[in-house]
Image (tube, helix red, strand yellow):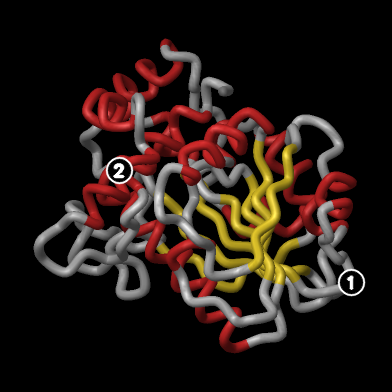
Amino acid sequence: MQTVSYTSQWTAAARALESERADAPLFEDRFARELAAPKGFELLEKYRGGGLVEFVAIRTKFLDDTVENLLSGSEIRQVVLIAAGMDMRAFRLRWPADAVVYEVDHDALLAEKRRRLSTMDAQPFVRRQEVPADLAEDWVPRLTAAGFDPGKPTLWIAEALLFFLTEDQASTLLRAMASVSAPGSQLALDILSEQLLRSPATRFFLSALAKDGIPWLFGTDEPEEFLRPTGWDLRVLTEPGRPDAGEGRWPYEVQPREVPGVSRNWLIRAEIATG
């Protein structure tokens, strides 16, 4: 598997810890512990601190709620998970009977996930299509070949992805999504702030990631301005610890937007631009 795929294992490890909480877990993912092998908990222990475990839990809940709210309250019936990794939403969320989920990722990762799922009692609650593709290449034809319909509104989920890309790569990816998004399409994702990548407080953590071949490259302090040229209009912008994003579960004080120099983890929902 690609080196970056190991981060999908640490994400699974963090989801396992949240699911196994004795007091009011934000979600339940009974498959997460198995999918975290072989390196998930090792990496989580190596990089833990700075709210990493808490952020994965809050981000997961934010995106879970986005999926369920949009599919229950709109015409969206196709969902695309970009760099799906060990995501198990198809196996644990409530889905309309006519929905379909497309999981886009490297062929090797999808094959490994398929192998592991075959050993567990894992049955999706929605029609699920694997889309083996390299996001560095022209991946859209592979998506349409799997049945994706650009004429229908779509919910795109890009979780724990953009910070592994350069700004140009991130912009190109979002433009590609926009190019095949019908009116009413939505995008849900997380983006780091540029300040977080520059902060002395994160220097050791980021250096360790870079040394292990998984550097974090991109962040922005102005997510609205970043998204607009890519074809998406921001609709929801929040951060961990706010009422709509894990209030009471974030270990740090939430600072107002106007306070400068704050490291932030943006949680975002955007809508395809119409004009």
Label 2 vs label 1, nearer the camera: 2
Work out whether residue 273 can be spotted.
yes
| Residue at x 17% of width, y 53% of height | 251
The disc label shown at residue 192, or none: none
Q: Viewer-proximal residue, 130 or 202?
A: 130
Q: Is residue 273 left or right of residue 224?
A: right
> As shown in the figure, which amino acid type bears the numbered disc 1?
Gly
Please tell me the numbered disc located at residue 151.
1
Report x, y in % for residue 92.
Answer: 43, 65
Badge 1 crowding class, 10 Å Cα cut-off, few under 14, some 14 to 19, many 20 or more, is few
Out of 185 and 37, give the one closest to the viewer.
37
Can you name the residue that lies furthest to the bottom here? 73
Residue 12 image position (x, y, % from top left): 37, 43
Q: Residue furthest left?
A: 22
- Camera-side residue of 67 and 244: 67
At mark 1, the secondary structure is loop
Q: Amino acid at mark 2?
A: Arg
The answer to whether the residue labelled 2 contacts the one labelled 1, judged by CB atoms less than 8 Å apart, is: no
The answer to whether 5 is drawn above or below residue 162 in the figure is: above
**Looking at the image, which residue is at 80% across and 58% down?**
178
Q: Is residue 219 visible?
A: no
Question: Which residue: 10% across, 61% down?
Answer: 22
The mark nearer the N terminus, 2 or 1, is: 2
How much space separates mark 2 and mark 1, taking CA atoms?
A: 38 Å
The numbered mark at residue 33 is: 2
Q: How many marks?
A: 2
Can you say which quadrant of the picture contains the C terminus?
Answer: bottom right
Q: Residue at x 67, y 33 (%)?
A: 106
Q: Quadrant of residue 97?
A: bottom right
